[in-house]
Amino acid sequence: MGERGALPPDLDELERAMETWLDAWESSKEDGQIQSADQRRLELLCPKGMEQWKHLRDHESNGANCHRKGEAKTTEEGREWHRKMQMIRRMCRRELHAIAWDAQRTHLEALPKRMRKMESKALWHPSFQKQALEITIQHASKVQHQTVDVRPAPKRGCTGEKGTKKQRRTTAFTRNMQATAEEQSRARLRLCGNRIEIKPVDFVEHLRNHACYANQITHERTLPKRSPSYAPFPPTLSSAVQQAAKGRGATSLYSHQEKAVSAAMNGKHVVVSTATASGKSVCAHLPIFQALVQDPNSCALYIFPTKALAQDQAQSLKEMAAAVLGPTASQQTVAVFDGDTPMDARGDIINSARVWITNPDMIHITVLPNYKRFARLLRNLKYVVIDEAHAYGGIFGSHVSLVLRRLCRICKRMHEALPTMIVLSATLPNPAAHAAVLTGVSPYKVVAQDSSPCGSKLFLLWNPPLVKGIAEARARAEGQRRAEQEAQRQAKRDSRTVRGAGARLGAVSDEQFLEELAIGVRHCNPIVSPPHDSSREGRPAGAMGGSMANQIRPLRVLGRGVTSVNGATSSGKSDGIKTGASALDREGRQFPDWRQARHGAAGTRTEDHRVSPIVETAFLLAECVQHGLRTIAFCATRKLCELVLSYATDFLRDVEEALVHRISVYRGGYSAEERRMVEARLFRGDLLGVAATNALELGVDIGSLDVTLHLGFPGSYASFKQQAGRAGRREQTSLGIFVAWDGPLDQYFVRHPDRLFGGVVEDLCVDPTNQVLLEQHLMCAAGEIPLEAYGVDVEYFTIAAQQASEKLVVKGILGRHPKHPLAQCLHYIGGEEMPARQVSLREINCARYVVIDEGRNKVLEEIEEQKAFFQIYEGAIYMHQGRTYFCHRLDLDHRIAYVRPHKVDYYTSVADYTDIQVVGGTLAFPERRAEGRAVPSSSVVSARAIVTQRWFGYNSFRKGSGICFDSAELFLPDLQYETIASYIRVPHWSRQKLREEGLPWREGLHGACHALLNIVPLHVMCGRNDLGTQCDNPYDTRYRPERILVFDKHPGGVGLSTRVGSMFQELLERALELVSECPCIGEAGCPACIQYTGCVEYNSVIHKGASIRILECTVQEEKDVHGPLDGD
């Protein structure tokens, strides 16, 4: 590396100042005496600021050489130089921006000259000079955005064309829209600064009187309180257990508790289905400890779906055991046995524990295959408690059902005992049926009449306000843009020499451009060429004239977005975060509706897009914490949780630094130690606010909560009611706030609140007769005890086990032992030593990526492979407990991501898409004879399909405003899995019919697929998340196959789509009836017809009228070609 030249005096002074700050930082850090304001400045500038300043200084002298070598990417050395150049460019741009933000204004005046020097050596982003620097100087000097005019001069020796081309890189609209959104968000959302404690009811009035309130509350509903009904303890309950219950505050039982306890003590299977916080745990605790008192050898098994819930109940059970059996016995009596249990502690648990707390995965992987080692537990097992039974539905619930049947099979056949089942669940529409199918035993005593008290709950619908000033900013920017373009064209005309009539580089005709764009051939082109104009025939190439205001073509850019006619950049859907974007119309050759910029993954018009609901949720969380309200903010994804915490931290830091330490994040991926620490702080009340995924949705008792915040609809009514039930425990009045996204689904609930509060809880479908799952668990059962599929095992696995076992025999997995006395007894003869390890209950890939903080050499998180690339990739801003890290290297071979602490004012979001490729296929219906020839009775095809998820780039967004200011490509391995799909072709003539009626084709096809998914659970036993379809993104211009398709969302397939294929025509007719008879009148439909709560594209491209026409055409085509269904 060459020796750098002398710095200008003002930059030398800035460098010396930064070195002084660095020394002060090191010494102050050792003394531990740093003021909060100075600490934030030092954290911003040092040591990372100093490090990147050196990057900028050291690479100044050899920038041109680096760029020259990077251009020759055909060699290995050239590719390495190119990668370094790209990394230096990004890091210098972002880090210098952060440094300049807090630097003195006198030194900032020298930065543009240095940036122009960097630009001349091709090491600087072409748009950073006019965009990031303007905003930097604007905030540093506190001047208006319009007065800043920092324009890079043309390179020395170049004509005006070179300089004007750089000025055209960033349009005035993008700058003005970003400044407008950022300034409005920061000015509007500020905490009141008053730390007086407020009750939840008074908090609503406080919000209405808040200076930042802009009529966000669109609906207010009060859920009435419920009075309690009491009953005495059962007379057979021992005095020790009664005294322990009274010592915990239960002087008497609620009526539903007394019924459940009495039935369980009498040996009856019990299912308790009551509201949240109704004391369901007592229904299991009392009969279990009664058994422990009566029989010193008796054991009980608690099964929880999550580790957080297991830890919560473990503490409660240990306190109960200490009160009943004595302090010394409590530690040996109750034990948690899950994946976090150390191996050296498992031996003592197996030998001495009497109350086991575990999850279905440990029973499946560890207990059942080694049942001889756990003989003490299984022989003395009196009760099995299945808590949060509403979490077991769909394919996961079917897996758990078969695991519980295997457990009962071993207890009955090996120890001649069957434990009493106690099933605890939130409100279910079919509690008895669900419990019987889940456990395989019956009958059940149903306790569903809730007699516990419940405080009133006030619920608000909070719709973020529309962003003001966007339309006015666009109009001003449009006029300025046209003036700039005319000036640029005039400069070109004055400076250009006519060289001849050669073809202009990059110029194509309108017809060719639109054709390439429609089929996805044309991608990002950095040069915007004017369209072909017949009036320019005969003009030499390169000569330009006339107005281009209405002729700039939309371009497809990285991140599923486009650069629209007004210059707004865009991005698409990424890891559950809805961001600013623009879009194109994909129908026909024109762009009538999509030429204007669009915002968010749902494709909302930019003029109609709302302030970020992430910021609004963080503001509400911070305001609640400031006033002493214990609050949980539920978010759909891990990154949303981190963003909410980051924004809330910024809000609280302006009020008091101590409040920052009273909020946290609880989500999957954290280490066991971090989860335990957050749980302990929640239990003690040290935390006032937490942003959480559904990991805290279930019945974790974290004390008395005051407020629940819901960032968007969680996907099901059951989940929404479970989340809302977290607050208001212990008879207190509570508050719930639903913060809506600007997508069709949430906005529908805002307009129709009765559908949100009056929604019926979905039925839970569990199918233990699914042939694919049954084969897997019969293989495991045979590996435990020889299988008698035609004998006693029919009691556990139903008669469907006979067909499944025969298939396993044909595959060579099961076989008959020649010396076994029972000829029909099947043994496991497969190649795996422990077949249970080959069956995953949750379809989770065991491969994980490890995130390592290089500065501390500490593991921050382990991320499942299918989720890893949404958070970690080279250039990503990784977030952990509200702190930001820069991912500078991703080792794909060893699955390690190396990150460094990095303070920035932006976040990154990956752009991806999912393709479904059908491979081969067979007709779902058999052939039938008609007029002497074989005619298939349906054109439905069931086939193998390959689902491919590809990550092709990422975008950088400003915090608060959500404006995309940078995009970069990614080259990551695809995530693929094979499954089963069924589909039917939509007739070609339907496209022309929709065009004649003025209806969009792509939106109609997407809505028709949603309607089919909404009707399937009524005819096929499956969960709402077990089947998927091909959803459309508003920014995707690729070819869309003319088909209505469903596929199994589980690798390998579980046979659901095949069953759908066998009744496809009937399901299409039912879907047509569903959509046609739905009374909603909006184009986007509603959740009862074409909106699907599990849509990965946020129901963005749907149209009810077009969906009806496509369903009608498809059904009619099937009847015309193949005839009506049998029986019609």
Image: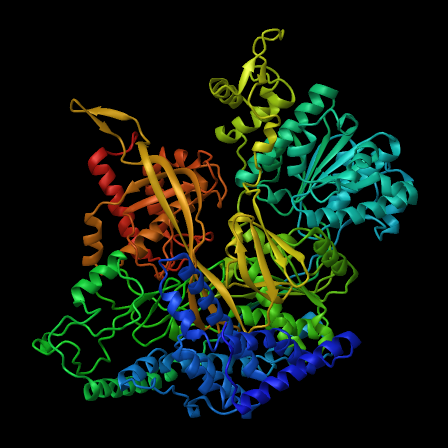
How many numbered marks are there?
0
Q: In the picture, residue 169 is in which quadrant? A: bottom left
Vertical placement of residue 1077 versus 985, above or below: below
Horizontal and vertical percent position of residue 117: 43, 82
Residue at 40% across, 61% down = 78
Is residue 956 toward the left or the right of residue 939 in the image? right
Between 591 and 1124, the residue placed more toward the observer is 591
Horizontal and vertical percent position of residue 755: 49, 58
Horizontal and vertical percent position of residue 603: 38, 65
Q: In the picture, residue 193 is in which quadrant? A: bottom right
Q: In the picture, residue 446 is in which quadrant? A: top right
Between 370 and 185, the residue placed more toward the observer is 370
Q: Residue furthest left?
A: 538
Vertical placement of residue 730 versus 467, above or below: above
Residue at 26% across, 73% down = 528
Answer whether residue 34 is visible to the viewer in this image: yes
Residue at 79% across, 77% down = 31
Horizontal and vertical percent position of residue 1028: 42, 45
Between 940 and 669, the residue placed more toward the observer is 669
